[in-house]
Image (cartoon, helix red, strand yellow):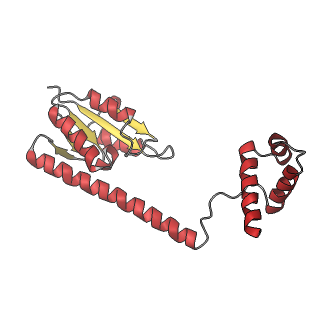
Amino acid sequence: MTNTLIGYARCSTDKQDLTAQANALQKLGVAADRIYTDHGFTGANRTRPGLSQALAAVRSGDTLVVPKLDRLARSVPDARAIGDDLAARGVKLQIGASVHDPSDPMGRLFFNILATFAEFEADLIRMRTREGMAIARAKGKLRGKKPKLSDRQQKELRRMYDTGEYSISDLAGVFSISCPTVYRTLDRQAIVADAAA
């Protein structure tokens, strides 16, 4: 029985910062060298190297500490699998300042309730994002990627290609674009021509 605190922190994107989570874990008593992290991994991604290292580091009698449950798991099955693993090994889970023993019936119940709410919150965020994008699209504010060439340039590229005198790489060089962009432009012009016919 080692009774060590092992911390875990995670950010979903490379643009987010782990400092606030690491500071919160240290305030909860986790030593800086006992904090494992994942940067740029979503909660839905179960193959998180930092989490694997944290789970490998905990021993019977230790406590795995996370600032919030959604940093550990983003779905009920994922949270339950981690909870079952911790319980089988005699490891407690601390979420913020609250310590839960997954082997205790009340601890397991509370853990499952928290996991359900974390999943519900993630679902709400996804739903709000989809609704926001739909509204922006309806207002014409979300149009996707702007073509690299103007309409006139696209028509000229098509005209030059149709002469048979220019290869795809020639056209890419003339218009300073990549070969895949040339193909996309030709496809787009073919659709425009079909619609006009």
Expressed as whole percent of the image width and height from the top left, the position of residue 53 reads 33, 29
Residue at the extreme front: 197
Q: On the picture, is 76 further left or further right than 147?
A: left
Expressed as whole percent of the image width and height from the top left, the position of residue 131 reads 46, 67
Residue at the extreme bottom: 139
- Position of residue 29 relative to residue 95, above or below, is above
Q: Which quarter shows the C terminus?
A: bottom right
Expressed as whole percent of the image width and height from the top left, the position of residue 115 reads 25, 51
- Position of residue 62 relative to residue 11, above or below, is above
Residue nearer the viewer, 169 or 10:
169
| Residue pictured at 86% horizontal, 52% vertical | 162
Residue nearer the viewer, 46 or 195:
195
| Residue pictured at 31% horizontal, 54% vertical | 119
| Residue pictured at 76% horizontal, 69% vertical | 196
Q: How many marks?
A: 0
Asked if residue 155 shows in the view, the reply is yes
| Residue pictured at 72% horizontal, 54% vertical | 187
Asked if residue 92 shows in the view, the reply is no
Q: On the picture, is 68 further left or further right than 108?
A: right
Expressed as whole percent of the image width and height from the top left, the position of residue 116 reads 25, 55
